[in-house]
Amino acid sequence: MTTLTAVTSYAPALDGRAMDALSGPLADALICLALALAALMATAVVLTRGTVRQAIVLSGYGLVLGLLFLILQAPDVAMSQIGVGTVLLPLIVVLALHATRRHRDTGHRDTGHRGAEKETRR
Amino acid sequence: MKARTRVTLFGSGAAGTAALFTAGALGLPAFGGALHPYADRAVRQAAAQGTPNAVASVTFDQRAFDTLGEELILLSAAVAAVVLLRAVRQEEQDAGGSHRHGPAEVPDALRTIGYLLLPVTLAAGVYIVAHGHQSPGGGFQGGVVLGTAIHLLYLAGDYPALRRLRPIPLFETAEAVAAAAFVVLALAAAGWAATGRVPALNGAVGTEVGCALVLLLGKFFEQALLVRETGPAARPGARAAGDPREPP
């Protein structure tokens, strides 16, 4: 639906007359807000200590980037960004961290129920 | 390579990139301006072919080969995960059914919400794929939603159910078939308007992306939760590290 309106709003541009959906003080304020939020979250990701926590903050950064794309009227990109940047990437990072930790000290700094299970099996 | 050489190499590369990037950024049209030469051409082309979604026209027609390359990148990522992250010698895999893996103590609220959101999110993913030729969304976006949606079961603390829901061999086959279907569809009508084929292309891409993400995440889940080192090389180190803390 948005794409249809995008096409119709582009139609005057085809005649040579320019028309911009992203102008006006409100749009400027929104874009500035989203950009500032993205910069803030990016800094937060860099400054966060601890890789697991960093992955969670990274998820928030992905969400803010999705918001920025949405405000810039790219809903397709926003959808991909929210799916990949908010869920997929942090999840893979967390899983990889968990796997490396488990392989490094085999099962001893593991989650509680696993350790208990190992004890009973012995 | 010495540290000094490395820093010099990185410094020269970074300086060159910075110079080129600055020059390129200065040459860009102003942000939010009225001049959109690419958009004008792309939208005119999409409108001339009668494609309702200009973005779909770009991804599946004007930039079809780019999309093809992206799908194949995702396919190779999934294949690499399947090949590299398998259980090797000195490792064994626990039977998934014997554990209740998941975030250790899942609150009831999270469990309920996970179960309730699963069908809703799956339906939304199918909608995004199926309606992608007319509205924002499409194969990739819907595929990402579908591929991540079933992992709500893990959030709900039910890893065995997640394993039952996604038999890896079936997803491997579906991934390969969908990728092949997309390549055939994209190549069979190269140079023709994509208008009528967009739903089929979206379907193929959605299946391929969804299966690829499920495979990727599935392999990472196996590594994180199920694969254990058992070989002789792993044992002594583990014992030595573990003995002081363990009761005799």
Image: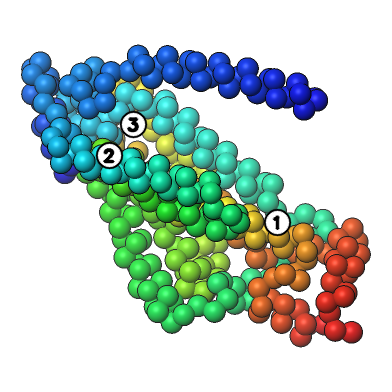
Quarter holding residue B219: bottom right
For this rendering, which residue is in front, A38 or B130?
A: A38
Identify the chain of the residue marked 1, using the numbered disc in the image. Answer: A
Which badge, 2 or 1, comes first in the chain's sequence? 2
Q: Quick check: do tags 2 and 1 share a chain? A: yes
Whether B119 is drawn above or below A74: the answer is: below
- Could you tell me which residue is drawn at 54 percent across and 79 percent down? B105
Q: Which residue is mark 3?
A: B59
Identify the image quadrant of the N terminus of chain B.
top right
The amino acid at mark 2 is Cys
Q: Which residue is mark 1?
A: A100
Q: Residues within 10 Å of mark 2 (few under 14, many from 20)?
A: few
Identify the chain of the residue marked 2, using the numbered disc in the image. Answer: A
Identify the chain of the residue marked 3, using the numbered disc in the image. Answer: B
- Could you tell me which residue is drawn at 42 percent across and 25 percent down? B65
Quarter holding residue B169: bottom right
Label 3 element class: helix
Q: Residues within 10 Å of mark 1 (few under 14, many from 20)?
A: few
For this rendering, which residue is in front, B75 or A105?
A: A105
Residues marked 3 and 1 touching at CB (< 8 Å):
no
For this rendering, which residue is in front, B202 or A29?
A: A29
Going by the image, does B95 lie left or right of B29?
right
Q: Which residue is mark 2?
A: A32
x, y percent for residue B229? 79, 62
Quarter holding residue B145: bottom left
- Could you tell me which residue is drawn at 44 percent across and 66 percent down? B152
